[in-house]
Image: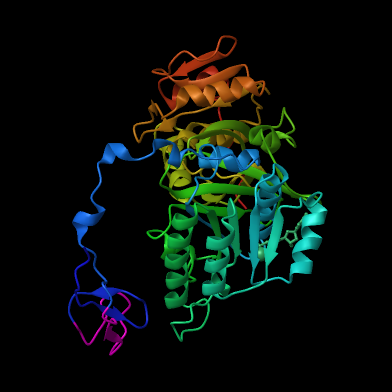
Amino acid sequence: MAKQRRVYVCRECGAQHVTWAGHCNECGAWAAIEMASSVAAVADTSDALAPLASFDLDAAVPTPTGVSEVDRVLGGGLVAGSVTVLGGEPGIGKSTLSLQIAASMASSGAAVMIVTGEEAPSQVAARASRVGPIPPTLSVLDDTSVETIEAAIIRERPQLAIIDSVQTLSVADYDAAPGSVVQVRAAANRLVTAAQRSGTSVILIGHVTKDGALAGPRLLEHVVDTVLAFSGDRHNELRFLRTVKHRFGPTSDVGVFEMSGLGLEPVDDPSSRFLADRRPGIPGSVVVATVDQQRPVLVEVQALVTPFGDRPPRFVGQGLSSSRLELVGAVLRQRAKVDLWGWEILASAAGGAEVKEPGGDLGIALAIASGLAETALGPDVVACGELGLAGEVRSVGQLERRLQEAFRLGFRRAVVPTSAPSGPTGLELIRVDSLNDALLVLGLSVDLPRPSAG
Ligand code: TYD
Ligand code: MG
């Protein structure tokens, strides 16, 4: 039996309050709280009480989308009745990716609905035809009214509904403009309910600005099941799909795509992509076995050293953490006694990649030393280890996976901390306990030249 209980609701954000107040502590609006119509707003909880063991465990089994990198990131695919936010900067490829997911699922017979509030259906069709043949079970709804979309989802019960984008939606109950906090939150709440009732998996596309400020993905994190962030580098065509939140599995893997004329193509092997343009035998270049959200990635770190006058060294990094670069510089000077006075050191992660975790320290130090010594490391050498302030080489997480990845991509020697686990057969481990030790065994500890002043 349902109890009749009064509930006060904020007109602006929809938050429920047990008592009336002049000010909504959810959204901050003044004089916006009203008594809800005398419906049974709060049900008697005993009605909903059910043994936990009675629930269908298969309900949370994901259905593959057929887009390999998406399935990898989602831990198998989309869960029925779940809501996923796909966030990213405008132009990064959210519509393209979601269209590919839609086309892939529809081509195996699933009913898929694309709700387009941003583009005309003819534009969506044009884009879809670029990516591949348009399956007959793929439909489009040109609407931004949440009530209409909700009704369509509940009536049609598609396997997947894609809403492009959440910022175009409006719920009739609220006066606020589409894209406002109130509308975005209210729309998402309604669609979460619709997804649960229909068993439809819903993907909500949301735009974010560079600083992630705009109403959208951030705001929705606690409302939805999964938040995916789609990002890329302006300078190349690689795109990265990462989980920010995932109710159904680990948020560890990264999906990598390349934007081509035929849409987004999965990149199964991102390390070899980063390393494709590498010219071996160049001093100042060292390949680092890094991890990006649990996924091992090999990145080439390059250092270029140029005379800078009679003054302290200057470090300029790109794709590297500046604090780690400074630490590496200090350890090179103070512990390995490498004289950096008078040099400007440019260090960068090649190919738009990033090395920001401590496991890159040793490789960055070796790249700088190799540049200064004008001695190239062998093309089959990879480095991995954190530098401590005492100059020691410390162990890092997931070293085994990093080494496996390096071996898979053709590396045969790895400079690693002494505590490293044994790597794959065929990969020679060069165990070093300090940076000094590493410079010695790699032949980089020759007397380094001091640049002439000027
Ligand atoms: P889009 O998916 O529209 O981005 P978003 O929805 O995140 O705003 O895609 C943006 C860019 O991708 C656009 O500039 C065109 C380009 N693009 C390709 O290069 N190849 C393609 O096959 C498609 C469909 C788009
Ligand atoms: Mg778009």
Q: Residue at the top extreme?
A: 425
Res. 313 in view: no
Closer to the camera, 136 or 415?
136
**Where 165 sits versus 17, above or below?**
above
Q: Main secondary structure of the magenta part?
A: loop
Closer to the camera, 324 or 244?
244
What is the basis of the colouring in this image?
rainbow
From the viewer's perspective, is 289 left or right of 264? Answer: left
Q: Quadrant of the N terminus?
A: bottom left
The image shows residue 303 at horizontal and vertical percentages of: 61, 40
Residue appearing at x 44%, y 32% in the figure: 337
The image shows residue 194 at horizontal and vertical percentages of: 47, 61
Residue appearing at x 64%, y 46% in the figure: 306
Label count reads: 0
From the viewer's perspective, is 121 left or right of 423? Answer: right
Residue appearing at x 70%, y 37% in the figure: 273
Identify the image quadrant of residue 95: bottom right
The image shows residue 258 at horizontal and vertical percentages of: 71, 46
The magenta stretch spans which residues?
20-38
Closer to the camera, 53 or 146?
53
Residue appearing at x 37%, y 59% in the figure: 222
Q: Quadrant of ligand 2?
A: bottom right
Q: Residue at the bottom extreme?
A: 31
**Where 60 sits versus 137, above or below?**
above
Closer to the camera, 141 or 380?
141
Asked if residue 136 is among those painted magenta in the image, a careful observer would answer: no
The image shows residue 343 at horizontal and vertical percentages of: 57, 46
**Where 15 sits versus 265, above or below?**
below
Res. 153 in view: yes
From the viewer's perspective, is 143 left or right of 189? Answer: right
